[in-house]
Image: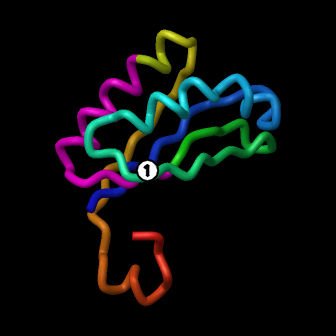
Amino acid sequence: MIILQCDFDFVGDLAEQTEAMRPLAESICREPGFIWKIWTGSTADGKAGGIYLFDTREHAQAYAAMHEQRLAAMGVVNFRALILDVQQPLSAITRAPL
């Protein structure tokens, strides 16, 4: 399993983001290899993003590339993506939702 961690500059209200991003959230569920996403954000720091779990590195990389282009088309700047392997045995001990 692979973690994709993304963040980008965000100016706005995170509560308002919930309804505006509902169609995006629904589309993410249909992406190849997608397992789950935790949405993140901090109005104080001007950041938004998410932590994703994918089944393979290839699926995570493909999604990150597509997502960066999609967000750029929406005017999002300073997109950053980090792809990491999940340390499953230790994650299981600490109750990760795997």
Q: Which residue is mark 1?
A: 52
Residue 22: where, in percent of width, then height? Answer: 63, 29
Q: Report whether 42 appears left or right of 53.
A: right
Q: Is residue 88 above or below residue 57?
A: below
Q: How many marks?
A: 1
Is residue 55 left or right of 76 when viewed as pictured?
A: left
Up-down: is 75 above or below 80?
above
Could you tell me which residue is drawn at 48 percent across and 85 percent down?
94
Residue 54 lies in the magenta stretch:
yes
Looking at the rendering, the stretch of residues picked out in magenta corresponds to 51-69
Name the image quarter holding the C terminus.
Answer: bottom left
Residue at the (81%, 29%) spot, across then down: 16
Q: Main secondary structure of the magenta part?
A: helix
Please tell me which residue lies in front, 17 or 81. 17
- The part of the image, by quadrant, that contains residue 84 is bottom left
Q: Nearer the viewer, residue 48 or 21?
A: 21
Residue type at mark 1: give it: Tyr
Q: 52 and 32: which one is in front?
A: 32
- The x, y position of residue 19, in whole percent, is 74, 28
**Percent coordinates x, y for residue 92 in the rendering:** 39, 83
